[in-house]
Structure formats: C-alpha cells, structure tokens
Image (spheres, rainbow, N blue to C red):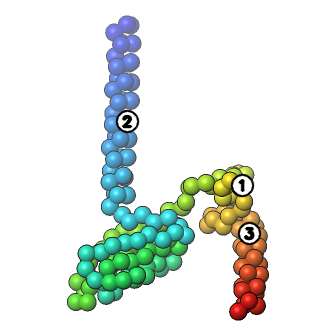
Amino acid sequence: MAALNFRIRNTTRVCYSLFLLAGLALATHSAAQASEAVVVTIDRAKVLKISRPADTIIIGNPSIADATIQDAQTLVLTGRSFGVTNIVILDADGDPIVDETVVVQGHETNTVRIYRRAVRETLACSPVCEPTLTIGDNAKTFVAASAQIKERNSLSDSVASKNK
C-alpha cells in the first residue's frame, strides 16, 4: 500500500510539473507574439520611427487605430478602439517599409472597474475617482458620461468663440 501511495504522489507531482511547464511555454510563446506586435493604448498616441521615408500608410481597420505622418520618417499611431489590426507602410516605389500587427489595448493606469454582475463601470482615479468613457462599460453610464463631456466641451467652445 505504501508503494502505491508513493507512486500516486510521484505521478501527481510529475503531472503538476508538466502542467506548470506547459503553462510557462504557452506564456513565453504569447509574450513572444505580443513583443512582435506594435502595442498602443486606446486614446493614446505612439511615435513610430521608420527606416525610410513613407509615401503610403495603410491601416487594416481604421476604427481600431489611426496613423498620421509627422515627417517623412516619423508616424504617429493612435489607438481608437480595442482590437487587433495591421499597419503597412510603403515607400514612393511601393516597396514595403513596415508590415506589422497593431494591438490596441485598454489603459490600466489609475483606473478602477466596478462590476455588478454583468454590468461594468470604469472610473479614472488620479487622485479622485470620476466616471470615464470606456468601451464595454454599462450603456447607461457611458451615455450619461458622454453627454456630460459633450456639454462641458460645448460650454468651453462657446466661451472660446466669444473671446476671439
């Protein structure tokens, strides 16, 4: 009985070790794939330097990311929405300079997410927590925050136009 118990414990340890190694291999593979992609945070810009002057920029899905030419060898890539797309940059001869995957991810810095079952609300906390517009949040909260932001911007625009 002791030998059987010893084999079961050893088999359990071996299985656990194999699962742990498989998990590490998967995590390493995922990290390697992520490092190959250009990662941009939603609603933020990232400067992308290229080796040769750009002539044409193609974004696979412009609702996920946007790119503008700052100068011939500097682009500004902006995350618009969560997702994965690609960017292709061609020179004047039509030869590719860049052909990369672009991953747009959410921001985590100074945010708190509140979950009430399937309903989510995101707050930006720096230092006081206030509602923020985040794709995937509760529609009612999102619309209310959006309306307040539009109203505030409208007031700012009207004051600015009076001062001209």
In the picture, the disc for residue 87 is none
Q: Is residue 83 visible?
A: no
Residue behind mark 1: 128
Residue behind mark 3: 145
Task: Report the Cα–Cα distance between label 2 and label 3.
Answer: 45 Å
Residue behind mark 2: 19
Crowding near the residue tagged with mark 1, few <14, some 14–19, many ≥20 C-alpha atoms within 10 Å: few
- The answer to whether the residue labelled 2 contacts the one labelled 3, judged by CB atoms less than 8 Å apart, is no
* Residue depicted at x 76% and y 85%: 159
Q: Residue 160: where, in percent of width, then height?
A: 72, 86
Q: Residue 82: where, in percent of width, then height?
A: 52, 67
Residue 132 falls in image quadrant: bottom right
Task: Report the Cα–Cα distance between label 1 and label 2.
Answer: 43 Å
Q: Is residue 141 visible?
A: yes
Q: Amino acid at mark 2?
A: Phe
The answer to which of marks 2 and 3 sits earlier in the sequence is 2
* Residue depicted at x 31% and y 79%: 73
Given residues 28 and 79, the one toward you in this image is 79
Q: Using residue 160 as the reference point, say whether residue 81 is left or right of it.
A: left
Q: Quadrant of the C terminus?
A: bottom right
The answer to which of marks 3 and 1 sits earlier in the sequence is 1
- The answer to whether the residue labelled 1 contacts the one labelled 2, judged by CB atoms less than 8 Å apart, is no
Circle 3 or circle 1, nearest the eye:
1
Given residues 156 and 107, the one toward you in this image is 156
